[in-house]
Image (cartoon, rainbow, N blue to C red):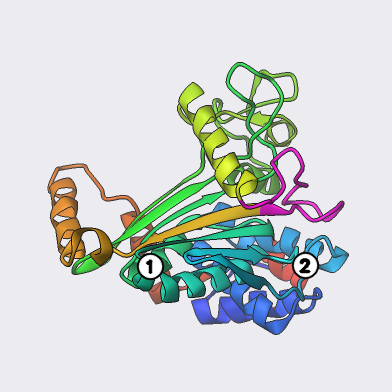
Amino acid sequence: MSDTTVSLEVARAYVARVLEGHRTSADNAALVADALVMAEADGLKGHGLSRLDSYSAQAASGKVDGQATPTVDHRATAAIAVDGANGFAYPAIDVALTELEALTPKTGVAAAGIRRSHHCGAAGHHVERLARYGLVGLMFANTPEAIAPWGGSKAVFGTNPIAFAAPVEGAEPLVVDLSLSKVARGNIMKAKQEGKPIPEGWALGPDGAPTTDPEAALKGTMVAMGDAKGAALALVVEILAAGLTGANFATEATNFFDADGAPPGTGQLILAFSPPAFGGDGFAARMSVLAGLIEGQDGARLPGRRRFDNRERARREGIVLPAAMIAKFGAV
């Protein structure tokens, strides 16, 4: 059996079908499938199809409730509390974004906190949606323990991604998407699945020494981006995404990858800003000027542009369903 190249539409249908076969509702499966396929198309493989195995196993075991329906509580004028009900993160995030898209133009700024959530995938996709609605988006997410405080040896923070997006007149949105480890943990999981080593400097093993073994890296800790500064920023994200929302801290959350144990119960905080409420009209045009100053320099690239190039190529050429996936879950 060999790898199979399919269109994005076929890939979405395939992933959704697999999830539906693992105790996931059709509506939830469609949202998860779209997230995984879009990440794969964008070249963000650590958040793409490599997650299908663990997602389906967790839904089958009940660690993730594939049938969950998120609930919304409007606790203040511009604050939305979303209970993910220990389901996949994507339905809860979809509800949060829908609420923010409607509320933010009225209030100028609004926030949605999500608890009892799960792996949020490529965080940039969620704020990109806000930017396409004309809003500025900022997202914080906490994840299971992975990074030790600076000078420490035991993980207290997750890789804790931050994402930002803003509209740019006449162009794709500006999207900044980064985890606070030097690389996303999903990249190490992907290396383990493929039986490949990881570069030195990505992670430390359980003994605190640098390692190139992905298995040892997953049992140890990730190296924070920017060393002490990155570890401090991970603390900030932990407070915003978990402390503020009532979600589990990284040390309380279970693994995103295996099917054993209680639900992870992590959290996300999404902020949305309506530009006219602050500086009047013309924000997207000003962003175009700023983007031009960056892209006008030889060798400089606006954050997020590579993913849009990859996405366009995937729309034309399709994406690859790995042979191992087809062998496990069946033919397309």
Give the quarter of the image for residue 331: bottom right
The disc, 2 or 1, on the residue closer to the chain's N-terminal end is 1
Task: Report the residue at 56% width, 26% height from top.
Answer: 200
Above or below for 315 versus 186: below
Q: Is residue 113 left or right of residue 327?
A: left
Q: Which residues are magenta?
A: 245-266
Task: Report the residue at 52% width, 46% height from top.
Answer: 161
Q: Residues within 10 Å of mark 2 (few under 14, many from 20)?
A: few
**Residue hosting label 2:** 328
Q: Is residue 247 magenta?
A: yes
Q: Position of residue 247 (x, y in %)?
A: 69, 51
Q: Residues within 10 Å of mark 1 (few under 14, many from 20)?
A: some
Tag 2: residue type? Lys
Tag 1: residue type? Thr
**Residue hosting label 1:** 107
Q: Position of residue 325 (x, y in %)?
A: 70, 65
Q: Are marks 2 and 1 in contact (CB under 8 Å)?
A: no
Q: Secondary structure at mark 2?
A: helix
- Secondary structure mostly seen in magenta is loop
